């Protein structure tokens, strides 16, 4: 063949062994064809690369190395690469297994968003394939809704295939395949794949997990997290915008608790905050995988092919959708099929949706009492625990607020909760306290008589203390007269907004300085040190202590001058706990 960009006509035999059947699609790197291996009589997918890509020698060498690695990938969830070649005229091609199926993009275009069970099944199989690819030193770099295919294995069970390893990259290679273009679909590319990566770091498997996160988000909500008409628009959004919540993307959907953060973690801008590997991502998805004992088959949901039994197909689709509306619709269309089971499922789903709408501990407890062994029991138990935590948190917040508005809000939110009786008591107490503090001392004493151990009892006692102390001026005068830090602190606590708050704080500061100088004079222990302290603080409330310490210093000086054992024993008897006791004990024994 030549390096022309013209499509290969049906019947053309490529490289003497691949007969072209027809064109499958056209991409940025070349064209894909359905072909038949003329010697093996087996269908293949042949991707003919654009000749211009091979004109660069460094690309050619990387293509050969990475294609060799790709042929070593053998996993049920990855399309097998059978062959590759560079022809004499400079053109090249890759040969992979032909998959008779549909892409995620095609399925969604025909059927709408994926049911939760199907979406998680697809994601789990893709993660299994990516884990295999990453562990063998490759990155896919183009995971997208176009490169994930849904097919069936020999037992007619759903088999998901990752296709198009054409832009795969050696994880140990620091060079890109081309230096002037991005490889992959900008709609699904990670920030680091778009260049948001330190110069000394390289791409790793987390770039593929980001791309799969985009695919999974789109499967679940029916819309992509980022939308743009241009590649540049996608690049800007991947680099700067936070994905919208599921509720913002599709307010009509109701997903299991905890699913959204699992998906959004894969879409973190900082790859260090994403899942470290495909296996860890898969472990996070496990709680949301379908309850069905086997994977989807040809007769389940819209994966069905021609010739299937319509009632069974519809029943499988209703189970996959798992909504009250889906089961009601099935019951109306097929009244003679799965009648008892459908009635039971409708009743259970209605009970679950009712509990979801109320979302209280009582509602979930009622649901579990009736449906504790049903398929939604695990989810209901999780929501029951979440409701308990939510109620307990709200109760704690109201306890800290200690006002009627907070308790009224709590009771409005949890009117029948296990803590509602306590909340009603606290509401009555707060009303009683509000009334009492507006009146007089007798009202506060009556409140304390009625609520001696209430949450506001301490507040009432403090209020009584304020009343006992009189107005602000009398309290300040009393604190000044006492002149102690205890008195000043008591004033500040009782009158935090008082007129003399600043004076009280300055007085405390002066006391702190005086205390420091007092301690310094004590450590010095001389008569001169104490005389200096008296001169600096003539009004200090600690004068009595200072006089006692000065007198000890006077008697110590006298004992030092005479220095007799009799005098030292007399000193120790007079000052058994004094500042100079240790020195006196030593001298008395000399």
Image: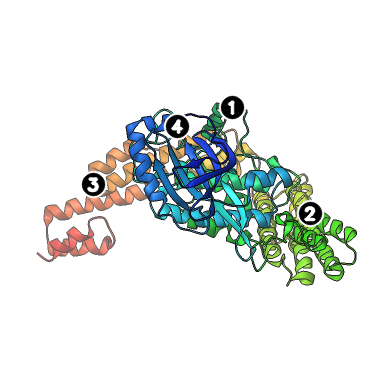
Badge 4 marks a residue whose secondary structure is loop
Return the residue at label 1. 230
Q: In this view, does 392 lie to the left or right of 95?
A: right
Front disc: 4 or 3: 4
Q: Which of 457 and 97 is in front in this view?
A: 97
CA separation in Å, label 1 and label 4: 33 Å
From the top left corner, tell me how far across and down residue 492 is, in percent: 55, 42
- Mark 1 or mark 4: whose residue is earlier in sequence: 4
Q: Nearer the viewer, residue 479 or 269?
A: 269
Q: In this view, does 323 lie to the left or right of 30?
A: right
Q: How many numbered callouts? A: 4
Badge 2 marks a residue whose secondary structure is helix
- Mark 3 or mark 2: whose residue is earlier in sequence: 2
Q: Is residue 536 left or right of residue 497?
A: left
Badge 4: residue crowd in 10 Å (few <14, some 14–19, many ≥20): few
Is 525 above or below relative to 354? above
- Mark 1 or mark 3: whose residue is earlier in sequence: 1
Badge 1: residue crowd in 10 Å (few <14, some 14–19, many ≥20): few
CA separation in Å, label 3 and label 2: 76 Å
Return the residue at label 2. 357
CA separation in Å, label 1 and label 3: 82 Å
Badge 2: residue crowd in 10 Å (few <14, some 14–19, many ≥20): few
Q: Which of 377 and 236 is in front in this view?
A: 236
- Residue 241 visible? The answer is yes
From the top left corner, tell me how far across and down residue 55 is, in percent: 37, 30
Return the residue at label 4. 2
Return the residue at label 3. 524
Q: Which residue is drawn at 53% across and 60% down?
A: 283
């Amino acid at each position: 063949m030549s390096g022309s960009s013209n499509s290969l006509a049906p019947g053309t035999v490529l490289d003497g062994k691949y007969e072209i059947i027809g064109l499958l699609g056209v991409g940025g790197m070349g064209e894909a064809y359905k072909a038949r291996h003329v010697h093996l009589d087996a269908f293949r997918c042949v991707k003919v690369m654009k000749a211009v890509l091979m004109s660069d020698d460094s690309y050619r060498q990387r293509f050969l190395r990475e294609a060799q690695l790709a042929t070593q990938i053998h996993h049920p969830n990855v399309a097998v690469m059978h062959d590759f070649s560079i022809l004499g005229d400079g053109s090249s091609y890759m040969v992979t297994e032909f998959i008779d199926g549909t892409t995620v993009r095609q399925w969604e275009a025909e059927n709408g968003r994926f049911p939760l069970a199907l979406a998680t099944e697809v994601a789990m199989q893709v993660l299994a394939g990516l884990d295999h690819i990453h562990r063998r030193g490759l990155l896919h770099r183009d995971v997208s809704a176009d490169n994930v295919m849904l097919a069936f294995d020999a037992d007619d069970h759903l088999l998901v295939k990752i296709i198009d390893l054409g832009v795969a990259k050696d994880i140990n290679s620091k060079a890109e395949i081309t230096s002037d273009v991005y490889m992959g679909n900008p709609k699904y590319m990670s920030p680091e794949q778009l260049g948001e990566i330190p110069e000394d770091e390289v791409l790793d498997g987390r770039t593929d997990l980001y791309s799969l996160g985009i695919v999974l988000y789109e499967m679940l909500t029916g819309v992509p997290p980022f939308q743009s008409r241009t590649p540049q628009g996608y690049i800007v959004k991947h680099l700067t915008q936070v994905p919208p919540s599921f509720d913002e993307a599709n307010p009509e959907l109701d997903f299991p608790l905890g699913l959204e953060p699992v998906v959004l973690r894969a879409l973190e801008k900082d790859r260090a905050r994403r899942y470290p590997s495909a296996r860890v991502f898969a472990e996070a998805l496990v709680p949301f995988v379908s309850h069905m004992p086997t994977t989807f088959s040809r007769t389940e949901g819209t994966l069905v092919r021609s010739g299937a039994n319509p009632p069974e197909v519809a029943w499988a689709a209703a189970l996959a959708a798992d909504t009250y509306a889906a089961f009601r619709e099935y019951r109306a269309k097929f009244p003679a099929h799965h009648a008892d089971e459908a009635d039971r499922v409708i009743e259970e789903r209605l009970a679950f949706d009712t509990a979801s709408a109320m979302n209280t501990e009582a509602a979930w407890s009622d649901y579990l009492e009736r449906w504790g062994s049903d398929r939604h029991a695990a989810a209901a138990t999780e929501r029951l625990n979440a409701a308990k935590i939510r109620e307990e948190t709200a109760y704690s917040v109201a306890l800290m607020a200690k006002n009627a508005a907070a308790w009224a809000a709590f009771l409005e939110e949890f009117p029948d909760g296990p803590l509602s009786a306590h909340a009603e008591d606290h509401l009555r107490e707060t009303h009683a306290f509000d009334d009492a503090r507006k009146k007089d001392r007798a009202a506060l004493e009556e409140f304390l008589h009625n609520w001696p151990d209430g949450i506001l009892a301490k507040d009432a006692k403090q209020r009584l203390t304020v009343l006992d102390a009189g107005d602000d001026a009398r309290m300040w005068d009393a604190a000044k007269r006492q002149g102690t830090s205890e008195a000043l602190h008591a004033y500040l606590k009782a009158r935090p907004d008082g007129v003399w708050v600043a004076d009280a704080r300055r007085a405390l500061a002066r006391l702190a300085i005086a205390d420091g100088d007092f301690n310094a004079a004590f450590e010095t222990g001389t008569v001169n040190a104490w005389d200096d302290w008296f001169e600096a603080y003539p009004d200090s409330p600690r004068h009595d202590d200072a006089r006692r310490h000065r007198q000890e210093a006077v008697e110590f000086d006298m004992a030092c001058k005479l220095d007799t054992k009799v005098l030292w024993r007399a000193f120790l008897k007079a000052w058994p706990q004094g500042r100079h006791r240790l020195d006196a004990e030593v001298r008395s024994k000399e």
